Image (spheres, rainbow, N blue to C red):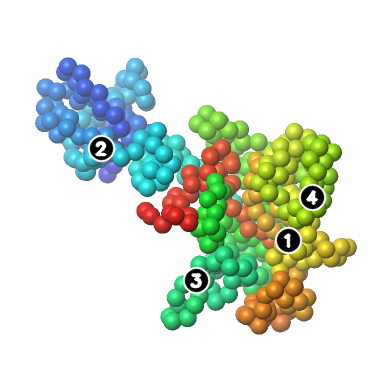
Amino acid sequence: MKTYIEELKIGERSEVSGFIDTVREQKTMLFVILRDRSGKLQVAIDKQKHKEIYEAVSPLLTDSVVRFIGTAIAAPQVKPGGLEFVPESVIIESTAKNSPIDKSSSVELKQAYRWIDLRDEKNRLIFEIRTFTEHKMREYFAEHGFIEIHSPKLTSQCSEGGAEVFAVDYYGSKAYLTQSPQFYKQMAIASGFEKVFEFGPYYRAENSFTSRHAAESYCVDFEVADIKSHHEIADIEEDWIIYVLKAIKEKYGEVIEKVFGEKVMLPTDKIPRLKLSEVFEIFEKVYGIKTPEAKQLDLDPEAEKLICDYAKDYLGSELVFITDYPAEARAFYTKKSDENPLESMSLDLLYRGWEMNSGAMRENDFAKLKAQIEEKGINSTKMQGYLQFFEYGCPPHGGIGFGIDRFIAKLLGLSSIKDSIFIFRGPSKITP
């Protein structure tokens, strides 16, 4: 049975295996740095005493996979680990050719050989931190009475009502890959589940080549019933994301700062909330930027970055909620404001210049929802499968869809979500 490098004990006969990281040859010795997921180990091969091992290992290239049986001995002068491994036998598990990529290779070439790129310790750490992050996200929901659902990813309807969908043949009929689990979250609320969450993929046929868009992304959604406004949704999300960030800071804060150069920061108080209209007022008063009325429906990437800078500099938070978007700019299922029907009961959470999620109170009145569908130019008869959720009673509710790929990228200061996604999919990327 293999022993991980970090678990080796001095003087104990063990079996270690992994990739060859580097090889250093001297007159009488061959030093092999072996790498597994837990760390690195120096294997010291005496050319005379271990002639057969030397002859088997010396021709191997970096990233060949080998298994050594032997004993770890104390070696305080050795980095890494302060020990080295003296082998008594070796098994060559897999030989490697010269790698087609190195640290200086282009992003495109690294993505083409993603499985090799992921061998880098820094890349592995990204997914270790991501695993912990998702665990803490799920843990919060489990501890607060949420029910986890797994909605279908093939559907007969488009959840956003738009054209950015992937159509597939479904037994001779047309179906679509879901843009989000939105309809099914709402169905769960209509089922009386009251609080639900889901981790799963989003599929968007957007012809986008930005650092934050993907054809297939991974998100976490939640939906809660019996709320009175979108601010209750923000309350829940605030508690949830701070819970997650505190856990990340405690376990990985020092590592993230050392390896990625980023500090895990928590808001000094609560996450600030700004109405969208207030954002444009801030831009004008603080930065002298006057935004044309026609462009006050949403925030473009530059505006998202600027308001995040403002929140950090003036409000002590790298996170900021933007609320009350114009109703015309939001999806048909978003509830309009009771005070101003031109505004919606909506919220976005921004983090370090990027939108992490959209969310809203949903319209649960059948007649109003049908009218809003028609207002968006969508034929409501084609949405009957969705509308029927509201014909038999459905409590007021709302929720969010949060982009995990984006969050990890911003948490670690990565240049693109291509680095926070195991295998990226985009308009021109369908392999490996």
Quadrant holding the N terminus = top left
Measured in 3D between alpha carbons, the distance from the residue under mark 2 to the one under mark 3, in whole angstroms, is 41 Å
In the image: residue 167, left or right of residue 114: right
* Pointer 1 or 4: first along the chain: 4
Of tags 2 and 3, the one toward the viewer is: 3
Label for residue 98? 2
Residue 225: give x, y in percent of width and height.
72, 66
* Pointer 2 or 3: first along the chain: 2
Image quarter of residue 179: bottom right
- Observer-nearest residue: 10 or 109? 109
Of tags 3 and 4, the one toward the viewer is: 4
In the depicted structure, whether residue 33 falls above or below residue 274: above
Q: Are marks 2 and 1 in contact (CB under 8 Å)?
A: no
Q: Which residue is mark 4?
A: 292
- Observer-nearest residue: 257 or 373? 373
* Pointer 3 or 4: first along the chain: 3
Instruction: Give, as a three-letter code, the residue at label 3.
Output: Ala
Label for residue 167? 3
* Pointer 2 or 1: first along the chain: 2
Instruction: Give, as a three-letter code, the residue at label 4.
Output: Pro
What residue is rendered at 18% in x and 36% in y? 90
In the depicted structure, whether residue 417 falls above or below residue 159: above
Of tags 2 and 1, the one toward the viewer is: 1
Q: Which residue is mark 1?
A: 329
Of tags 1 and 4, the one toward the viewer is: 4
Instruction: Give, as a three-letter code, the residue at label 1.
Output: Ala
Residue 54: give x, y in percent of width and height.
15, 29
* Pointer 2 or 4: first along the chain: 2
